[in-house]
């Protein structure tokens, strides 16, 4: 996590860096800092958000400095505080660093440096790294670029760093392992950032550093890239960024989360455009077509993911088993990577990740590949580490998701999964034409159906008002609606801080039913497909314990309606598509409750969008 931004060129660096940090704030917002450098350098840093940094920096002269770098932090080593904020300076004050990642062997390095007379004022691993660079630079009489390269060969962990040294004014050194780093190439100017969003209004030309790559960017000598491992010069690959400014701005909405909820019809359309060919009875996902034989011969699939993406994986389990008769296991990436999973040559592992940077998912992919698996990635962020590590894959094309809570990323992951289920069913010969046509047609109609559900916003806001002060919520569903219940509960807890749990409805009587009384709101997803009568019975059981019932039902429902205190109707669709439609009112419910409780829904406490630490 953490976001880093840097600039070297001819413009004022300060506004570029501040604006860039605001765009990267989704990566962490515990503290922020900036250093500007020309003839002399200033470092300003503070606990809190980039807006706090702006206030603190207002008393400094920030004008006329054309080189600088900034940082927005998600705390790992050391509490959020002014001292632990980046940039960190070396003991001489000459070298400054911003860092996204974790230096795992920092304790041993710190001891070695202390033995050599270095002192430390923060609790961070980053301060150790900047002093290691200084130690190597001074003890071996090297330029800072070479010292960075040697230092990084001694480091265990993950990093994206930018380093400046007062002895080399007009130069920035950057390097990457594990955490993302993009370099924007302008005319006589360069931008550095954790993703391309801070510089898209200045240049579309970018280089995404690969692991173990570094670059020295100099005013006089331009840009040179090297391998950290052997110091060899690397020829950079410059790409054109496909990102537009509107997609990363709020576009009239109060919060990114609300914008992203409302973007879902459009986003889902983008996900299936050119891939869902209803009339031809065809799904055209190139990542599958190029690996058709592998999927055709699949004897089992393991899905690895975290958080919301893991919930999408659960839907895939139900669908792939149902439509393609392939056994599927869904695993938390963080558990998978640390046990001794049975993965054999030829196994298929599907990794699902919005950001494409989640450290546990990435590590799980590496493990799966080492064991000979074929890895298929479902990612949103184009060119992300997971997308690149996979053997094949499908992008969700949801566009940038900036609100920390996943909304459109989830429903577009599900859209990819539905298309995959249909195609795998065809490849395996386990889905008949009538079923294929029915699901494909309904999928194509989803954007319109979602529009109709979004129209219930005011009704949902009213329900939110009634329950905003609850301390606990339960979310229940069966079959495909069980993952939707888990996702609904996660959404509520992460942005409103109300304790919420999702359960398979029938599991209630094995324990959680003890929690139910008149103060417990229970959200039930009780649509008419699947095990409708069974869930009606479950709702009866809750009703008899006086819980408040908020139900998501199919339009025209009678039975659940009678038992419920509040009803939200969604259009009738096949079971596998319900989690997409049901998620929309659940997102809105969480959103409104969180807003009414005064929470910042885009930046919930303790969270970050891109979890690049394990
Ligand atoms: C919740 C949420 C997280 C992410 C999880 C995985 O709203 O967004 O639970 O789903 O951190 O992130 P990705 O999908 O980027 O791997």
Image (spheres, rainbow, N blue to C red):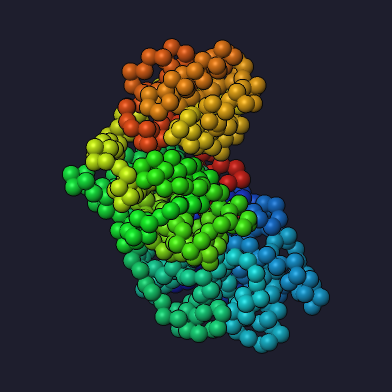
| Residue 107 visible within the image | yes
Q: Residue at x 61, y 45 (%)?
A: 606
User: In the orientation shown, which residue stands out farthest toward the left?
Assistant: 279
> Residue 492, image x and y in percent?
53, 33
Q: Please tell me whether residue 520 is drawn above or below residue 501 in the rendered image.
A: above
Q: Which residue is drawn at 41% across and 80% down?
A: 235
Residue toward you, 426 or 357: 426
Q: In this view, does 448 lie to the left or right of 547?
A: left
Residue toward you, 345 or 399: 345
Q: Please tell me whether residue 351 is drawn above or below residue 470 in the rendered image.
A: below
Q: Please tell me whether residue 311 is drawn above or below residue 555 in the rendered image.
A: below
User: In the orientation shown, which residue stands out farthest toward the bottom?
Assistant: 141
> Residue 127, image x and y in percent?
69, 66
Q: Quadrant of residue 431?
A: top left
Instruction: Tell me the quadrant of the picture where the N terminus can be found.
Output: bottom right
Q: Quadrant of residue 169?
A: bottom right
> Residue 96, image x and y in percent?
62, 70
Q: Which residue is drawn at 35% across and 29% down?
A: 453
């Amino acid at each position: 996590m953490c976001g880093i931004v840097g600039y070297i060129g001819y413009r004022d660096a300060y506004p570029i860096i501040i604006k860039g940090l605001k765009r990267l704030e989704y990566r962490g917002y515990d503290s922020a800092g900036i250093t500007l450098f020309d003839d002399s350098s200033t470092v300003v840093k503070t606990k809190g958000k980039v807006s706090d940094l702006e206030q603190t920096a207002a008393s400094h002269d920030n004008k006329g400095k054309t080189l600088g770098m900034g940082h927005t932090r998600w705390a790992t080593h050391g509490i959020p505080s002014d001292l632990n904020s980046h940039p960190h300076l070396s003991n001489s004050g000459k070298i400054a660093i911003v860092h996204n990642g974790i230096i795992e062997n920092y304790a041993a390095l710190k001891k070695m440096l202390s033995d050599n007379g270095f002192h430390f004022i923060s609790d961070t691993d980053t301060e150790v790294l900047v002093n290691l660079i200084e130690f190597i630079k001074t003890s071996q009489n090297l330029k800072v670029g070479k010292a960075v390269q040697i230092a990084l060969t001694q480091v265990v962990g993950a990093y994206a760093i930018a380093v400046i040294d007062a002895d080399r004014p007009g130069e920035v050194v950057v390097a990457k392992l594990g955490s993302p780093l993009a370099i924007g190439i302008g005319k006589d100017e360069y931008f550095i950032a954790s993703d391309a969003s801070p510089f898209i209004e200045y240049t579309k030309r970018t280089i995404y550093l690969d692991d173990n790559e570094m670059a020295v960017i100099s005013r006089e000598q331009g840009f040179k890239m090297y391998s950290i491992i052997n110091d060899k010069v690397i020829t950079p690959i410059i790409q054109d960024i496909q990102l537009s400014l509107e997609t990363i701005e709020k576009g009239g909405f109060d919060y990114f989360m609300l914008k992203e909820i409302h973007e879902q019809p459009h986003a889902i359309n983008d996900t299936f455009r050119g891939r869902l060919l209803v009339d031809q009875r065809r799904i055209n996902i190139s990542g599958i077509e190029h690996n058709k034989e592998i999927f055709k011969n699949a004897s089992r699939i393991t899905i690895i993911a975290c958080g919301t993406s893991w919930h999408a994986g659960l839907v895939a389990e139900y669908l792939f088993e149902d439509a393609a008769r392939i056994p599927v296991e869904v695993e938390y990436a963080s558990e998978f990577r640390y046990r001794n999973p049975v993965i054999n040559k030829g196994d298929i592992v599907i990794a699902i990740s919005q950001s494409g940077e989640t450290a546990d998912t990435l590590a799980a992919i590496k493990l799966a590949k080492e064991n000979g698996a074929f890895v298929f990635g479902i990612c949103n962020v184009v060119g992300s580490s997971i997308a690149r590590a996979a053997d094949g894959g499908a992008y969700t094309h949801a566009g940038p998701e900036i609100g920390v809570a996943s909304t459109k990323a989830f429903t577009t992951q599900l859209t990819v999964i539905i298309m995959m289920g249909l195609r795998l069913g065809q490849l395996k010969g386990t889905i008949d034409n009538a079923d294929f046509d029915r699901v494909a047609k309904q999928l194509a109609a989803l954007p319109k159906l979602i529009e109709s559900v979004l129209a219930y916003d005011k009704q949902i806001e009213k329900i939110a008002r009634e329950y905003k002060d609850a301390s606990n919520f339960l979310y229940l569903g069966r079959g495909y609606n069980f993952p939707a219940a888990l996702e609904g509960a996660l959404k509520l807890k992460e942005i409103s801080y109300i304790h919420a749990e999702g359960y398979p409805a029938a599991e209630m009587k094995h324990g959680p039913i003890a929690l139910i009384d008149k103060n417990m709101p229970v959200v039930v997803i009780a649509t008419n497909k699947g095990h409708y009568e069974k869930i009606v019975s479950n709702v009866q059981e809750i009703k008899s314990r006086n819980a408040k019932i908020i139900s998501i039902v199919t339009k025209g429902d009678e039975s659940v309606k009678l038992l419920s205190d509040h009803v939200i109707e969604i259009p009738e669709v096949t079971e596998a598509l319900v989690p997409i439609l049901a998620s929309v009112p659940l997102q809105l419910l969480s959103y409104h409750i969180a807003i009414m409780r005064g929470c910042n829904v885009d930046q919930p406490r303790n969270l970050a969008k891109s979890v690049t630490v394990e």
